[in-house]
Amino acid sequence: MRKPGAMHKARWMAKVIYAIKMTLYSEQLRNLPKGTVAYGDQLDKLKDFVIFITHVYCDWWLKCQSIKRAPLMDLHLYKTLLSYKQVNAKIANSALRVLNRHLWYLTPEMVVFGLFDFNAPERDRQEMASRLKTLKPEDLPSVPSNRFGSDYGKPSFPSIDHETSLSDLLSTDSWFAVKLLNLDMGFLEEPVDKWQKMESFQLSASKVDNIKVINDAAERGVKLTTDYRAKSKSEFHFQNLLQVVEKYRKEKPHLRKKMKTCD
């Protein structure tokens, strides 16, 4: 057993690993002088935390790697947390409070991507297809309607219970994503088991697969913006500057490493 080194708050998985190790060695830690590692009931609380991580969080965190899987995984996570109240209501309610602020992939314009999730039951995907056809407006929406706040606005998150399905979360706003990505939805007219062989589904699925859902792209975008915003003279100049920088970095991907080597 070694004392952990410096650890930034953003390194969430490092905290999880250390918590699991401490729980596995909890009996040995209890034999140490009081206050050496933990005080009072801290080890018991740590055990509750590890049980939650291993039984609820890790499964969701490891599998949610693509936008087409995100709606079903987030819905399963929410329902799991509702059930977890019977195990530990305090942890479940705390997790639900946080998740209720991050239901982005369960909004109507995002949940439609669940149609392309091969891990979702065929029955659920068929229900989504049937409901989506009934919700199709004459003119596809240019912007989502269920928004609040200024400018583009933020989505209103849905209410979820044990009976909620992906098809229940669809609305006319779901067609906004279809229009935005120019998806060919002709496959909706056929049974689910025929979709994979249809060209319309294959083309639409390839577009969906290329959408990034990890934070890396957003964080790099924020860093790029903060680095060059002050150097721009106008919005037009700013947008051009960002494109030039991005293009140059793609052409010279190892430039920074070479500079460090030269130093």
Image (cartoon, rainbow, N blue to C red):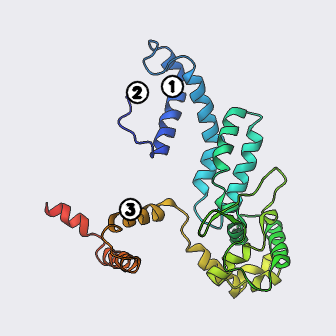
Q: In the rendered image, which quarter is residue 153 located in?
A: bottom right
Task: Assess whether mark 1 and mark 2 are in contact (beta carbons under 8 angstroms).
Answer: yes
Task: Assess whether mark 1 and mark 3 are in contact (beta carbons under 8 angstroms).
Answer: no
Out of 245 and 112, give the one closest to the viewer: 245
Mark 3 to mark 1: distance in Å?
Answer: 41 Å
Side (left or right) of 93 relative to 8: right
**Is residue 26 shown above or below 164?**
above
Secondary structure beneath label 2: loop
Give the foreground label among 3 and 1. Answer: 3
Task: Assess whether mark 2 and mark 3 are in contact (beta carbons under 8 angstroms).
Answer: no
- Quadrant into which the N terminus falls: top left
* Dot placed on the residue nearer the N-terminal end, 3 or 2: 2
Tag 1 residue: 25
Tag 2 residue: 1
Name the residue: 46% across, 42% down: 14
Name the residue: 50% across, 18% down: 39
**Is residue 101 shown above or below 118?**
above
Q: In the rendered image, which quarter is residue 141 located in?
A: bottom right
Out of 101 and 193, give the one closest to the viewer: 101
* Residue type at tag 2: Met
Picture coordinates of residue 256 (x, y %)?
Answer: 25, 65
Mark 2 to mark 1: distance in Å?
Answer: 9 Å
Secondary structure beneath label 3: helix
Mark 3 to mark 2: distance in Å?
Answer: 38 Å
Name the residue: 65% across, 49% down: 99
- Quadrant into which the C terminus falls: bottom left
Tag 3 residue: 223
* Dot placed on the residue nearer the N-terminal end, 3 or 1: 1
* Residue type at tag 1: Tyr
Task: Report if residue 88 is visible in the image.
Answer: no
